[in-house]
Amino acid sequence: MVRERGQYQDLAEAERVSRAVLGLLGARLTAGEVSDLASQLPAQLKDALVHAPQQAQAFGVEEFVQRLAQAVGTTPQTARWDASAVLTTLAESISGGQLNQVLSQLQSGYAELFGKPELT
């Protein structure tokens, strides 16, 4: 789903972007939330979240996009597209309760990246 939504050339590119996005998301969440979220991810992506820091970092959407752009070597505009491709797919793949728990730990602007602008 991420490959199609993000229009990536191959699965390797989709996985590389997904790992970068999930790693940054994991840095924003508490350790308990990271563990809960990882339990609903495919095995090949769980470790992208599991390596998150013990203490959740507080940074907004714009910094998230900037960090992602730097991590994947792209522009902020492309990084925002990448984040949305991965996080919208994530939102569709996890339970509604889990999504609410994740969004409750993030600033309101993140909901749009998850394809849920109505929750902003």
Image: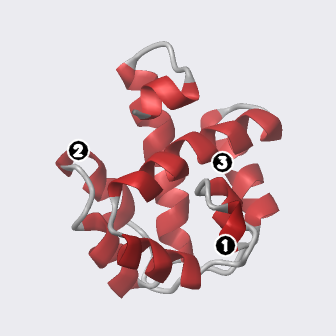
Instruction: Verify CB contact (< 8 Å) between mark 1 and mark 2.
Output: no
Residue that mark 3 sits on: 68
Residue that mark 1 sits on: 119
At horizontal 56% and vertical 74% (from top left) the residue drawn is 28
Left or right: 11, with 86 as reference point: left
Return the disc, 3 or 2, that comes first in the chain's sequence. 2
Instruction: Verify CB contact (< 8 Å) between mark 1 and mark 3.
Output: no
Of the two numbered discs 1 and 2 in the rendering, the one whose residue sits closer to the viewer: 1
Dot 1, how many residues are within 10 Å of its Cα: few (below 14), some (14-19), or many (20+)?
A: few
Q: Nearer the viewer, residue 3 or 120?
A: 120
- Choose top left, top right, bottom left or bottom right for residue 98: bottom left
Q: Which mark is residue 62?
A: none
Left or right: 8, with 40 as reference point: right
Residue that mark 2 sits on: 44
From mark 1 to mark 2, how far is it between C-alphas? 29 Å
Residue 46 showing in the rendered view: yes
Q: Is residue 39 above or below residue 47?
A: below
Q: Secondary structure at mark 1?
A: helix
| Residue at the far front in the pictured view | 118
Q: Nearer the viewer, residue 113 or 51?
A: 113
Residue 110 showing in the rendered view: no
| Residue at the far left in the pictured view | 43
Q: Quadrant of the N terminus?
A: top left
| Residue at the far top in the pictured view | 9
Query: Mark 3 is on which residue type?
Result: Leu
